[in-house]
Image: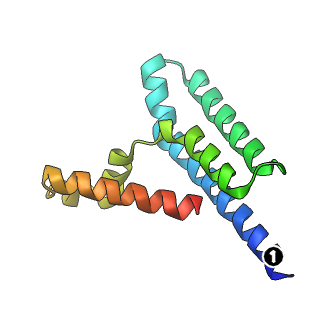
Amino acid sequence: MTSAESVKLWSKDMIKRLVIFLIAVLIISGYGLYAQTTGSPQEALQLVKTTVSDALKIIDSPTISTANKREKLKALTMPFFDFKTITMLTVGKEYWGKLSPEEAVSLTSAYERYLLKFYLE
């Protein structure tokens, strides 16, 4: 395998990791939140399916550059992420409660940047 092929595979692998992460987050937070607001689990499930399908179309498109794929995936998925809740669940209730409001905002912002960098770069 050449280094160019390795980079190409790595980029696709990273993007697929985003889709896996997206599925997990949508199921955990987006699915529940959407179902609560509309009262329809079927609509929530359809939203997950549609979003994942759209993400896979972006990933598999040979005409879209990797950088453009990242931007399109970010735009597609960002409305579903509640980074405050994700951060709070990651840190744990005990530690989250010990943070000042400023620390909570700062930590949430830092964790959001970390997740975006990890899954999109």
Q: Which residue is mark 1?
A: 4
Type of colouring: rainbow
Amino acid type of the residue tagged 1 in the rendering? Ala
Q: Position of residue 42 (x, y in %)?
A: 61, 23
Q: From the viewer's perspective, is residue 74 above or below residue 100?
A: above
Tell me if I can see residue 84 in this picture. Answer: yes
Q: Position of residue 50 (x, y in %)?
A: 68, 32
Residue plotted at (12% across, 54% down): 100
Q: From the viewer's perspective, is residue 11 above or below residue 5?
A: above
Residue plotted at (25% across, 56% down): 106
| Left or right, 74 with reference to 38 | right
Q: Position of residue 64 (x, y in %)?
A: 77, 49
Residue plotted at (74% across, 50% down): 59
Quadrant where the N terminus sits is bottom right
Q: From the viewer's perspective, is residue 39 above or below residue 89?
A: above
Of 105 and 36, nearer the camera is 105
Tag 1 secondary structure? helix
Tell me if I can see residue 93 in this picture. Answer: no
Of 52 and 41, nearer the camera is 52
Quadrant where the C terminus sits is bottom right
Residue plotted at (63% across, 59% down): 17
Q: Residue furthest right?
A: 1
| Left or right, 9 with reference to 81 | right
* Location of residue 52 (image quadrant): top right
* Location of residue 47 (image quadrant): top right
Of 39 and 65, nearer the camera is 65
Q: Residues within 10 Å of mark 1 (few under 14, many from 20)?
A: few
The mark total stands at 1
Q: Position of residue 5 (x, y in %)?
A: 83, 74
